[in-house]
Image: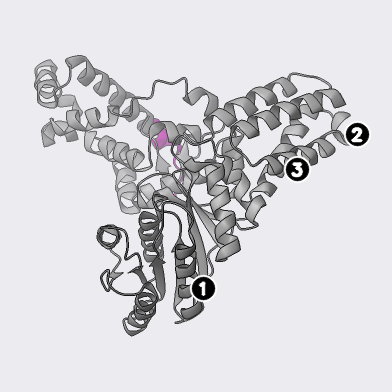
């Protein structure tokens, strides 16, 4: 998981600070030396680290901090504020043209950064918001690049404009905008060619497209796993072509996170989105304050709430509420909620967003395959058994275990969990007000965990 090593080191440093009743200037300077070492090991740009440590130290050794009631907590607060500032403080949105004018986004980047996949995800998100996007295949060099964009576009339900691999990318870009105008589309996303490394021909082609097409914004897609190389690539693209922002992909991988903390400071350009997985919703808007909270091990409740809201079906939620009120909660409902949790991502990732859980998650033995076995057990039940769990006697459970390919003990364990969940639902029923809202318990944007 991204930032895991950095988060662990920072939490240990902060733990030592909190443990001191009073802080001296030497305490602060020693802590900042450790923070500096942790940031450098996370592949944060050296100049960025130097400036960051200098600013934090100057603020932290002020008399108001050292003589305060909780100096350790105040230093941590300063680190958080300066880290947010490092990444841009405020969320930056992509600019859209008003009315019926066509917005054109040029996506650039090196080969392998995930540019084509990101283009389709971005288009899918705009479609979800009610826009009419068009993906344009401008990569005429890489084998199967056009086909890849068509496949990804189909997944998102977004049309792809292509003129094959024998036309000039500038002509393709111009023709796609004309096509969009004729067909009532208001966003065109140009998926341009990448290379294995920065070269003059790629830069020249991008410059030609921008010279001949009214590009609204140029967005660079970089791979977070390349660390400082991602920052260097961003700087080169900014100098040669000019970029308006960055999308950082593969932040869910085994990355030290240095690129996320360095790009804004080095290039002056904001991170717009981060890629946290393969699904459409895994392309997340970048919020500096949320990312800082995650890096510092403070959780990310707002993103967790948004994930829950995206996962829950309002109609299903209303039906479930009726069943809870009538005490008709069955295995189908249990399975439905499990699948909603599954759609939010890995259990470990979800738990890591809960404040205070960061350090504990890595010590938990989270069995991500458990949901699959639960599904198999429930699908091995008859419709009558799923709706009326009281029918499940020992012989039925034995049959279900054989059908699901699991042990009898796993079936018994699930039945026990289900009964606990059903009892909790009955208790919840008494907590609901007239409008059906819960007065207590763990409720995120209407999404109720079944355990």
Q: Residue furthest right?
A: 63
Distance from label 2 to label 1 (Cα)? 48 Å
Mark nearer the viewer, 2 or 3: 3
Left/right placement of residue 396 relative to residue 221 reads left
Q: Earlier in the sequence, mark 2 or mark 3?
A: 3
Q: Is residue 429 magenta?
A: yes
Please tell me which of labels 2 and 1 falls first in the chain.
Answer: 2
Secondary structure under badge 2?
A: helix
Where disc 1 sits, the SS reads: loop
Residue 149 placement (x, y as % from top left): 30, 60
- Write down the residue under mark 1: 216
Q: Is residue 57 rendered to the left or right of residue 189?
A: right
Question: Between 308 and 131, which is closer to the camera in this rendering?
Answer: 131
Above or below: residue 138 compared with residue 275: below
Q: Position of residue 259 (x, y in %)?
A: 56, 44
Circle 3 crowding by C-alpha within 10 Å: few under 14, some 14–19, many from 20 = few
Q: Which residue is depicted at the point 60% across and 39% down?
A: 293
Colouring: one colour
Q: Which residues are magenta?
A: 427-435
Residue sitting at 50 percent across and 58 percent down?
Answer: 220
Q: Which residue is mark 2?
A: 63
Pointer 3 residue: 51
Observer-nearest residue: 66 or 228?
228
């Amino acid at each position: 998981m991204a930032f895991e090593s950095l988060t662990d080191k920072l939490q240990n440093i902060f733990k030592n600070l909190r443990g001191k009743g009073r802080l001296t200037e030497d305490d602060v300077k020693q802590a900042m030396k450790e923070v500096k070492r942790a940031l450098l090991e996370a592949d944060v740009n050296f100049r960025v680290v130097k400036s960051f440590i200098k600013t934090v130290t100057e603020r932290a050794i002020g008399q108001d901090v050292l003589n305060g009631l909780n100096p350790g907590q105040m230093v941590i607060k300063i680190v958080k504020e300066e880290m947010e500032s490092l990444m841009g403080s405020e969320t930056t949105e992509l600019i859209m043209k008003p009315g019926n004018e066509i917005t054109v986004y040029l996506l650039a980047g090196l080969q392998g950064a995930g540019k084509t996949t990101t283009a389709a995800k971005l288009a899918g998100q705009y479609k979800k918001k009610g826009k009419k996007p068009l993906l344009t295949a401008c990569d005429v060099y890489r084998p199967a690049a056009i086909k890849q964009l068509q496949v990804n576009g189909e997944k998102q339900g977004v049309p792809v404009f292509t003129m094959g691999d024998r036309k000039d990318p500038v002509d393709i870009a111009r023709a796609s905008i004309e096509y969009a105008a004729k067909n009532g589309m208001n966003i065109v996303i140009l998926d341009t060619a990448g290379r294995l490394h920065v070269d003059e021909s790629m830069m020249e082609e991008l410059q030609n497209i921008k010279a001949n097409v009214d590009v609204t914004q140029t967005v660079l897609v970089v791979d977070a796993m390349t660390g400082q190389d991602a920052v260097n690539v961003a700087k080169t693209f900014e100098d040669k072509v000019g970029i308006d922002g960055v999308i950082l992909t593969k932040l869910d991988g085994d990355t030290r996170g240095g690129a996320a903390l360095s790009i804004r400071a080095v290039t002056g350009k904001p991170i717009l989105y981060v890629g946290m997985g393969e699904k459409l919703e895994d392309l997340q808007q970048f919020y500096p304050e949320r990312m800082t909270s995650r890096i510092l091990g403070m959780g990310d409740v707002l993103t967790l709430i948004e994930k829950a809201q995206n996962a829950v079906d309002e109609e299903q939620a209303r039906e479930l509420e009726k069943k809870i009120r009538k005490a008709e909660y069955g295995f189908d409902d249990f399975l439905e909620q499990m699948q909603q949790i599954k759609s939010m991502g890995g259990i470990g990732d979800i738990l890591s967003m809960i404040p205070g859980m960061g350090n504990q998650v890595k010590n938990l033995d989270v069995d991500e395959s458990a949901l699959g076995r639960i599904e198999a057990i429930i699908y091995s039940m008859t419709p009558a058994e799923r709706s009326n769990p009281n029918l499940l006697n020992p012989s039925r459970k034995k049959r279900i275990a054989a059908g699901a390919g699991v042990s009898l003990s796993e079936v018994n364990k699930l039945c026990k969990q289900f009964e606990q969940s059903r009892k909790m639902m009955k208790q919840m029923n008494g907590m609901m007000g007239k409008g059906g809202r819960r007065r207590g318990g763990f409720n995120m944007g209407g999404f109720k965990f079944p355990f």
